[in-house]
Amino acid sequence: MKFFRLTFLPICLFLFCENTFCQSNQNATIIGRWLSEDDERSEIVFTQINMLSYYDKKLTSTTTYEINNDTLKATDKALNKTFFYSIETLNELHLSLMFLENGHVTLFRREN
């Protein structure tokens, strides 16, 4: 039993810390302005807590978001709706999101 505690506890601690680091790393990486590869009039801006959607430089929606593993959950309080996306790619240059409701994938590139 002592062996089990000595082995199991560090593994759980490692997995918890790794998961927490990955989530905070994803949140830090996603923050910024992203332009759609398909339509440059479409862009999204991620802040610490909000995802702002623009079309032709006009704000079209504001949602709060959270990232859990590779899932982005965006909540639009004005519409009382929640949207789920799979984060297919996320790095310093590219972001691709799959809208889980219909499987549509949108590709973005980071804009400075």
Image: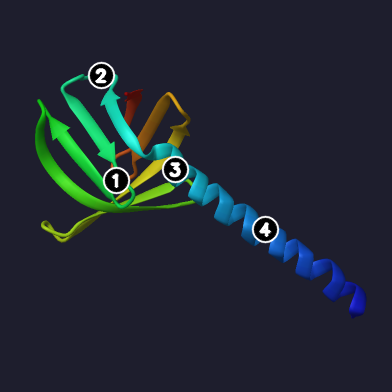
Q: Secondary structure at mark 1?
A: loop
Residue 101 badge: 1
Quarter where residue 40 is shown:
top left
- Residue drawn at x 46%, y 32% is 89
Q: Residue furthest bottom?
A: 1
Counting from the top left corner in percent of width and height, residue 67 is at 41, 51
Give the distance between the C-alpha atoms of the residues marked 3 and 1, in whole angstroms: 26 Å
Q: Residue furthest front?
A: 112
How far separated are the C-alphas under marks 1 and 2? 20 Å
Where is 59 relative to 36, above or below? below
Q: Secondary structure at mark 3?
A: helix
Can you tell which mark lies on residue 38?
2
Which numbered disc covers residue 28? 3
User: What is the C-alpha distance between the residues marked 2 and 4?
Assistant: 38 Å
Identify the amino acid type marked 3: Ala
Residue at 15% x, 61% y: name it. 80
Say few, some or many: other residues with alpha carbon within 10 Å of mark 1 (under 14 / 14 to 19 / 20 or more). few
Which of these two is toward me, 74 or 59?
A: 59
> Which quadrant of the view contains residue 75?
bottom left
Identify the mark nearer the N-term, 2 or 4. Answer: 4
Q: Quadrant of residue 7?
A: bottom right
Q: Amino acid at mark 2?
A: Asp
Residue 39, how many percent across, how many down? 20, 20
In the image, residue 6 sits, relative to residue 65, either above or below, namely below
Mark nearest the camera among 3 and 1 is 3
Label 2 secondary element: loop
Whether residues under marks 1 and 2 lie with C-beta atoms below 8 angstroms apart, the answer is no
The amino acid on which the numbered mark 4 sits, given as a three-letter code, is Leu
Tell me which label, 1 or 2, sits earlier in the chain.
2
Tell me if label 1 and label 4 are in contact, CB under 8 Å.
Answer: no
User: If the image is split into quadrants, where does the N terminus sit?
Assistant: bottom right
Residue identified by numbered label 4: 15
